[in-house]
Image (cartoon, helix red, strand yellow):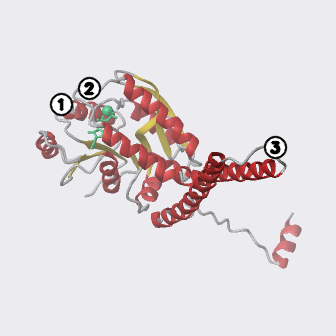
Amino acid sequence: MKTHTVYSIVVPLYNEELVIDEMYKRITAIMDQTGETYELVWVNDGSKDATREMAEALCRKDSRIELINFSRNFGHQQAITAGMEAAKGDAIVVIDADLQDPPELILSMIEKWKEGYDVVYAKRSKREGESFFKKLTAKTFYRFLDHLTSVEIPKDTGDFRLIDRKVCDALNALPEKNRYVRGLISWLGFKQTAVEFVRQERFDGETKYTLKKMIKLAFDGITSFSFKPITCFTLIGGVILTAGLIAFLADGISIGLGFIEFSGITMIAIMMMILFGITYTAFGIMGQYISRILDESRKRPNYVIDEKIHCEAQTYTLSEQLNKKTAI
Ligand code: UDP
Ligand code: MG
């Protein structure tokens, strides 16, 4: 008989041979405390070390583990996407393998979920054991993204979060490819809340997020939720063009009234301003078109419905109303 799964714990794994056993122990110890059914969805993102063999060995011992082996390294965001697509639980938790996200926090997330929240994200109040460079780039990026986007994406949060089944289904239905999952979850809406935690040092091993992967994630975040970088040239071009035209008029009038002599250099500078202004404005206008093409090509739905409510209004015939009155 198939049992109902209450929780799915999705863990992306890339070259995590040094942490996998400890991660399994810590997560199962916590999840056993819930007294409810759960599954562990592990996505091995093309690891080149012993992660695959170790995960397969654990999978043979524990039927709660579902292991998905990618054919090569597709990246963290694709790994968690695959995990969420495979998850069967009523609530889905995404957590990193390296125990930087404390599994103990899952219990607080579950509490919030039971209170009625659909998304419970973990907000880092402090980061421990990470390099100055990592802390600085992360802090700067989250603030920069916040300025650029109209969707409110919570700052200092990664992908460590719990989502309700209905949010997971809505997320899985989004067809876009370059996924910035935490942003997409914010974009979906629903009832969201945070639990705070101190981000720990990695249990073992090195970060698997190379600078190249971090830059790709940052660009996915920005291009998925902001058109400002591509459309800002309209404003820059407009300002330069206006300044160039004002300078042209002022120069012409001053020469006409005999205040100054004609200067070839000044005229070249003014012409350059006007030409640059036109070019940048044209870039900006193209940006407006490109941003619309991008928007259409993503095929995001125009809206997401949480629930539809139809309350059947009680209607009475005239005779029923009269009967009611006489009964009173
Ligand atoms: N990860 C992955 N694919 C990658 C890089 C990372 O599945 O290409 C996984 C990794 O195994 C870990 C999580 O994503 O479970 C976060 O990676 P990491 O801890 O190295 O990133 P950091 O915490 O340093 O940002
Ligand atoms: Mg980590």
Earlier-in-chain disc, 2 versus 3: 2
Q: Quadrant of the N terminus?
A: bottom left
Secondary element under disc 2, as helix, strand or loop, is loop
Q: Quadrant of the C terminus?
A: bottom right
Q: If the picture is divided into quarters, which one holds ligand 2?
A: top left
Secondary element under disc 1, as helix, strand or loop, is loop
The x, y position of residue 215, in whole percent, is 37, 42
Task: Give residue 18's mark.
Answer: 1
Earlier-in-chain disc, 1 versus 2: 1
Type of the residue with mark 2: Phe
Label 3 crowd bin: few (<14), some (14–19), many (20+), radius 10 Å: few
114 to the left or right of 285: left
Badge 3 is on which residue?
259
- Whole-angstrom CA distance, mark 1 to mark 3, is 79 Å
Rendered residue at 35%/40% (across/down):
214
Q: Quadrant of residue 304?
A: bottom right
Is any part of residue 129 visible from this angle?
A: yes
Type of the residue with mark 1: Leu
327 to the left or right of 109: right
Instruction: Give the vertical position of 93 relative to 196 (above or below).
Output: below
